[in-house]
Amino acid sequence: MPLALSAVLAASAAGTSSDSSAFLRQYLTVAIFAAAAVVMVGAMLGLGRLLRPSRPQEQKSIAYESGVDPVGQGWSQSQVRYYVFALLFVMFDVEAVFIFPWATRLEAMGTYGLVEMAIFIGILVLGLVYAWRKGVLRWV
Amino acid sequence: MLAVSMPYWFETLIKTVVVLGVIPTMALMLGYVFLMKMMSHMQSRLGPMDAGPHGVLQLVADGVKFLQKEDLTPANADKWVFAAAPLLVLISTFLLYVVVPAGPRLVVQDLDVGIFFALAVSSISVIGVLMAGWASANKYSLLGALRAAGQLIAYELPLVLAVIGVVIQAGTMSLQGIVRAQQHGAIFGFGNLGEPFILTQVVGFFLFLIASQAELTQTPFDMPVAESELVAGYMTEYSGFRFLFFFMGEFGTAAALSAIAATLYLGGWYIPGVHGLAADVLGPVVLITKMMLVAFLIFWVRFTYPRFREDQLQAFAWKYLIPLALANIMVTGILKVAF
């Protein structure tokens, strides 16, 4: 992949010793950004602590239920209506992970790759059609 | 180049500080321009006018107000999860900004799996939403969170599958690579103007827009926060700055997803005829202009359409968008191999 190669070369020209450390360094930046989000949230809440009042009252910490006293517990049992959709989602999401590498290399693979993927997607569409005909895609 | 000779840590520090400034700015800009002014004018009213010229500072004033509000946690809440939830939403927003390029060299990290990474981190936020809804120990919050999860399940797929068309055309997942791929070629043989992928991926572009509308829980898809049904959905129990973090996450992500859509389909920071250093200087302006165009479409739809029903939402995704996205992949693949 010439693009990836040139990216790695550019990164190693920037003073990194080897390709793998340049690669890992890219993801170190990702980790630093996640940490920056934590620091920002901490800093803002810390600043807020200096400025905001704190007058705890029992009534303030009751769960909000449109102004009337809450009935029962907040953690009530609720019907997750879309668990069948969730199963379908897992199937299709994994499929998407398989399609991405194929998509980057399609030019090299040509007709062979295209036929291969047509079969792959065809099987998945069959699955979707089956689910559809079985009435799974109806909200119950 | 200056950027190359700097040690890694120094460079990363500068990038982090810049992005720390960019994210709230983007959130404020979208919030002011679209949520306050555009919506007001579409509804024949002026919107906020007092804070600053034409009300520009209204959201800053709101921020200062939120800063002074008492920080409440419900007595029954799961305290740690309750506190961690907005953090997770913001982390997802922050990570989106890592891969969006604003110029030939203006990018935090041009990951090889750029767009794939962006799609992956954008869905982290739903875990934060689920945590918020569950930890609040509030029925509205729980229902809102479950709706948000159901929505993500339905609309993550059209979003991911729509992008594959672009990846096929560009032959790379790196966002810089995708921008570069759009610089060559001519529009229907006219001049050397580059070829933004929207010309060949119109279907993909609209699939991406609809799916990001749902990911951002903007109005036809705003069931997780539907005011008239669920008060504020998963945000009901949040007050003060913690509430503001959700707002910042929503609008920061809206800006990031619009910028990604602009990068994928409208050529990103590139305009014809600008190369080298000039592209680095003009790049951010061009990208923000294109981003605002895309965001305009998203918010225009938001202010125009009424809310879907939950069953319509699922049916729309599974019966129309996903088959359409799969067809788009196959047609793009066939055309790529044929030409």
Image: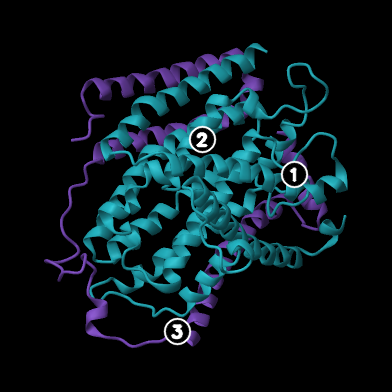
Chain colours: A purple, B cyan
Secondary structure of the residue carrying numbered label 2: helix
Question: Which amino acid type is shown beneath numbered disc 2?
Answer: Phe
Which residue position is annotated with label 3? Answer: A52
Question: Which amino acid type is shown beneath numbered disc 3?
Answer: Arg
If the image is split into quadrants, where does the N terminus of chain B sit?
A: bottom right
Indicate whether B169 appears above or below B295: above
Real-space CA distance between mark 1 and mark 3, rounded to the nearest whole angstrom: 48 Å
- In front: mark 3 or mark 2? 3
Secondary structure of the residue carrying numbered label 1: helix
Number of dots carrying numbers? 3
Secondary structure of the residue carrying numbered label 3: loop
If the image is split into quadrants, where does the C terminus of chain B sit?
A: top right
The answer to whether one can see residue A35 in this image is no
The answer to the question of whether label 2 and label 1 lie on touching residues, with beta carbons closer than 8 A, is no
Quick one: label 2, few (<14), some, or many (20+) residues within 10 Å? many
**Image position of B90 (left or right of B321):** right
